[in-house]
Image (spheres, grey):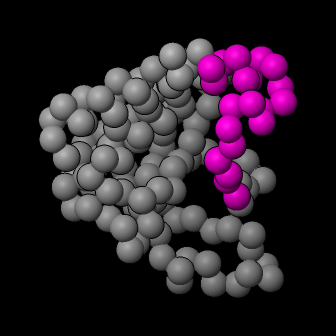
Amino acid sequence: MEIFERARLDAYFSKIAAQFVPDEPVASFLITHLLPERPAFVRAVAAMSCLKAVLPKPKSISPAAQRVVEQAVPVDALTRELFTDPDTFRFLFRTTADIGELQTEEVSDAAWHEIDEVTAPQLRQRIADALR
């Protein structure tokens, strides 16, 4: 990625992070592709929460992006072997970070929606403001 493209991504994600500040402090860990443009996204997550660790998807890791992210937050391995018994564990993460208490629910899906499909007025307005 060119420098101007990275700057544009940083500006975009900074704007989003500023619009969606949590009401109370939260800690997070992030499972994501670690591609060349991803450090900007990771910085935004860290701005919105106390990011404890990044677990990159094993088949999509850019070594350069990993080096950048590792300067700010621990990056741990994520492998299928960590998920050994689906009947016993909903999820299992091993990390070198001190992550504290985990939320008992998991996010198992995401979808892209047009802004006019968002039914909550306050959320729709916050998204619209962030896109300006």
Residue 16, percent from left and from top: 51, 25
Magenta-colored stretch includes residue 122: yes
In-front residue for pair 113/44: 113
**33 w.r.t. 114: above or below:** below
The percent position of residue 121, horizontal first and vertical second, equals 81, 19
- Please state the extent of the stretch shown in magenta in the rendering: 109-128
Residue occupying the point 84% across, 30% down: 119
- Say whether residue 77 is visible: no
Q: Specify whether 92 is left or right of 106.
A: left
Foreground: 45 or 71? 45
Q: Confirm whether residue 67 shows in the render.
A: yes
Nearer to us in this view, 64 or 79: 64
The reply, left or right, for residue 89 in relation to residue 16 is right
Q: Is 21 rendered above or below residue 35?
A: above
Instruction: Identify the residue at image location x=51%, y=50%.
Output: 30
Which residue does the image show at 73% across and 48% down from the upper left? 103
* Residue 38 place in picture, x, y as percent: 35, 47
Q: For residue 18: magenta?
A: no
Vertical position of residue 113 compared to residue 49: above or below:
below
Q: Quadrant location of residue 91? A: bottom right
Please indicate whether residue 128 sits to the left or right of residue 29 in the image.
right
Determine which quarter of the picture holds residue 3: top left
Does residue 35 appear left or right of residue 15 in this picture?
A: left
Classify 21 as above or below 59: above
Q: Residue at x 32, y 65 (%)?
A: 61
